[in-house]
Image: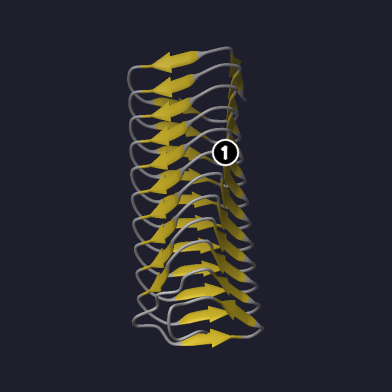
Amino acid sequence: MGASVWGLEAGGELEAGGELEAGGELEAGGELEAGGELEAGGELEAGGELEAGGELEAGGELEAGGELEAGGELEAGGELEAGGELEAGGELEAGGELEAGGELEAGGELEAGGELEAGGELEAGGELEAGGELEAGGELEAGGELEAGGELEAGGELEAGGELEAGGELEAGGELEAGGELLLTVAAVPTAILEDGGDTEGERQSGCY
């Protein structure tokens, strides 16, 4: 059975066996867990881990001090931050910046209105888009198009199933592969082997790809 309230604040852990819905802000000083869908009309914050068995949605900012996991889609109207790993079974969307201290994975499309950063590997089953800089501490992979409004950096391999576009400098610690066009304003790939399945367009001071 689910629970529905207007605004809710708990100094410690907060757990619901089914759905949990708050019309306003929802905050827990410790872990926050819902067996089903978890929704807050305003900000949603957990001092520890945050987990929803179904969809997870916040009308405002969404923050977890530890790992953040949603069995379905995950959406935040504002910034989205997880101190540890961040995982969504479906699409993942943040209206502002998106940051994960560990690995970041979305089963579907992944979109951030601002900067997007993952301390570990970053993977999206569909398109991956960041309005600002995009950075992954490990491998970076998108099943569809990959676009960064600013710099694009991966500590390991960088792969896009479709078009790959970066508004700023591009750097990959391993191989770089794009299934479609590669559109770069400035490219810096010091240790990468480039594989491009489509047309390549780029501007560099030297060594055009």
The quadrant of the image that shows the N terminus is: top right
Query: How many tags in the picture?
Result: 1
> Which residue is at 66% across, 83% downward?
199
Horizontally, is 87 left or right of 109 in the view?
left
Q: What amino acid type is highlighted by mark number 1? A: Gly
Q: Nearer the viewer, residue 1 or 64?
A: 64
Mark 1 surroundings within 10 Å by alpha-carbon count, few (fewer than 14), some (14 through 19), many (20 or more): some
Q: Nearer the viewer, residue 206 or 121?
A: 206
> Which residue is at 49% across, 51% downward?
132
For label 1, the residue is 95
Q: Quadrant of residue 15?
A: top left
Provide residue 176's location: percent of width, then percent of height: 47, 80
Q: Quadrant of residue 29?
A: top left
Horizontally, is 86 left or right of 70 in the view?
left
Horizontally, is 175 left or right of 149 in the view?
left
Q: Residue furthest top?
A: 6
Q: Which of 34 and 180 is in front in this view?
A: 180
Secondary-structure class at tag 1:
loop
Q: Which of 9 and 35 is in front in this view?
A: 9
Q: Is residue 30 above or below residue 107?
A: above
Provide residue 201's location: percent of width, then percent of height: 61, 78
Q: How is the image coloured?
A: secondary structure
Provide residue 167's location: percent of width, then percent of height: 52, 61
Q: Quadrant of residue 160?
A: bottom right
Q: In this view, does 50 lie above or below 26?
A: below
> Which residue is at 54% across, 55% downward?
149
Q: In this view, does 187 lie above or below 47?
A: below
Q: In this view, does 184 lie above or below 35?
A: below
